[in-house]
Image (tube, helix red, strand yellow):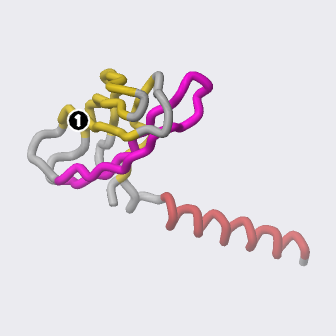
Amino acid sequence: MLAILAAVAIVVTFGVWVVWAGPGQTDHGLDTDDIGYQVLSDHATVVRSQVSVDPGTRAECAVQVLDKSYTIVGWKVIDLPAVEQRSRTVSTEVRTTTRGVTGLIHDCWVP
């Protein structure tokens, strides 16, 4: 009896996972590449990135600036409207609490 309950629990868990992460989910070809950054001052950094996503798909990205100890000192979520090109270059000015030493896209997603 215990073996049957364990088997049922495994099947149910697998079924829930398939529904959550299964074939209906897609990343819409979402990909990012960091191009560079420019520290403008102790309180501002421009982050340049290339974002690729399926044409006609809106995306959002979290851009972050880090200090020399890799602490996040600036964070900004940007909205990328749907366009017909697959790739685009994005420049984002991020306000910082202290001087940053690097900037990059932390993550992107399709809302």
**Magenta segment includes 58:** yes
Can you say whether 54 is above or below 101 in the image?
below
Q: Is residue 12 left or right of residue 43?
A: right
- Is 45 or 33 nearer to us in this picture? 45
- Is 107 or 104 nearer to us in this picture? 104
Q: Residue at x 36, y 50 (%)?
A: 77
Residue 73, position in %: x, y? 51, 37
Amino acid type at circle 1 is Val
Q: Which residues are magenta?
A: 57-81
Q: Is residue 40 left or right of residue 65?
A: left
Point out the image quarter for the C terminus: bottom left
Q: Residue at x 45, y 33 (%)?
A: 65
Residue 68, position in %: x, y? 57, 22
Residue reaching furthest to the front: 42
Q: Main secondary structure of the magenta part?
A: strand
Residue reaching furthest to the bottom: 1
Residue 61, position in %: x, y? 35, 46
Q: Hey, which quadrant is residue 33 in on the image?
A: top left
The residue indicated by pointer 1 is 90
Q: Residue at x 11, y 40 (%)?
A: 85
Point out the image quarter for the N terminus: bottom right
Residue 97, position in %: x, y? 48, 39
For label 1, the SS is strand
- Is 59 or 71 nearer to us in this picture? 71
The answer to whether one can see residue 63 in this image is yes
Total numbered circles: 1
The answer to whether one can see residue 37 in this image is no
